Image: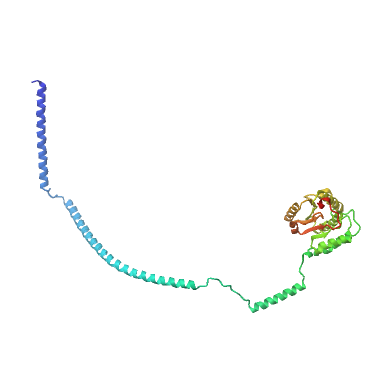
Amino acid sequence: MDNQELEAMNNENDQDANASAAEAASEMVLAEDQALESDPPPAPDNPVLELALKDLQSRRDELSAEITLLTNRKQQLDAELKTSFAGQSDAIARRVKGFQEYLGGALQDLVQSVESLDLVVQPMVVQPSPLDQQASDQQGAEGQNASDTAPAIAVSDTFRPDEALIRNALQRFLQQPDVYADPWSLRRSIDARDTALLEDWFFNQGGRGAQPSRGSRPRNILVSAALIAIIGELYGAQFQCLVLAGAPERLGEWRRGLQDALGLGREDFGPSSGIVLFERSEALVERADRLEECGEVPLILIDTAEREVAIPVLQFPLWLAFAAGPNERLDDDDLL
């Protein structure tokens, strides 16, 4: 046998010896554990530990007593709750039943009352007291007397406060013409029929209305010049004359006639001047509205060629329309 086999045999012997030793040690440990379990450890001799154990035991006893007391109290409350809930439920049910019956009867009564109501509102007639009737009769009589004694101010009385000034101016125009008069003053003379026309326009029509033509456009322009001169004395620079003729030829005739009768220049005709000439009534009305917005007074003159007065013109306070007579010559375009 060689050395390797000897070493192998030695190793096996060593392993068997070790296993035997381990088994012997484990048997000794098991024996000791069994001895410890069978024999309880002796009570400790430390007085502090004994006192702590006694304290814990007493607290345990107190908690057990409290648990027992609470358990009994819970059982008692459960019994009382069952008994009282059943009784209260019965009482509540009886009350609800009674209220239901009462509510049903009240609703039926309400329905019957609503059905018997007259929902159509009857008109209420209030008769005045006899005393009020007498007072109203007296006031009516006093008002009637006042109206009889004091006449109401009519539209034709617009120029009554300035009647003296207007009549003096008309009388002055009947005299010899003043060719050296100031601009905007009449430099020509008119006759009695012209003054009668202007008096009727001022005092009977209140400055708003149509007058019969004087037979020709130059004569109508002369009457208009006299009117412009009087309005200038009444309103000063707070008015502007607007002429509606409908054609450039007629407007040129108006411009030349007014320029000669009032001593005006070409600069006095234009949008920013005293006299403005128009071919269409719409533009004239728009200009008159702007003048009133600025606090000025528009004086509207309408030529005989205009067959009708536009309705918007009627709203302005001063306008004069010349109505063509049966014997007055008409332009060729007016005959179409």
Quarter of the figure with residue 207: bottom right
The residue positioned 11% from the left and 30% from the top of the image is 15
Locate the N terminus and report the quarter of the image it occupies.
top left
Q: Nearer the viewer, residue 191 or 182?
A: 191
Image quadrant where residue 186 sits: bottom right
**Residue furthest toward the top?**
2
Which residue sits at x=20%, y=54%?
56
Q: How is the structure coloured here? A: rainbow
Tell me: 200 left or right of 311. Answer: right
- Residue 3 vs 136, above or below: the answer is above
Residue 269, percent across and down? 81, 50
Question: Image check: 62 left or right of 250?
Answer: left
The residue lying at 47 percent from left, 73 percent from top is 113
The residue most toward the right is: 176
* Residue 235 location (% of width, % of height): 79, 58
Horizontal and vertical percent position of residue 243: 80, 53
Q: Please name the residue shown 41% across and 70% down the image.
A: 104
State the count of labels.
0
Residue that lies at the very extreme toward the front in this rendered image? 336
Q: Nearer the viewer, residue 227 or 29?
A: 227
Q: Position of residue 14 (x, y in %)?
A: 10, 29
Q: Residue furthest bottom?
A: 130
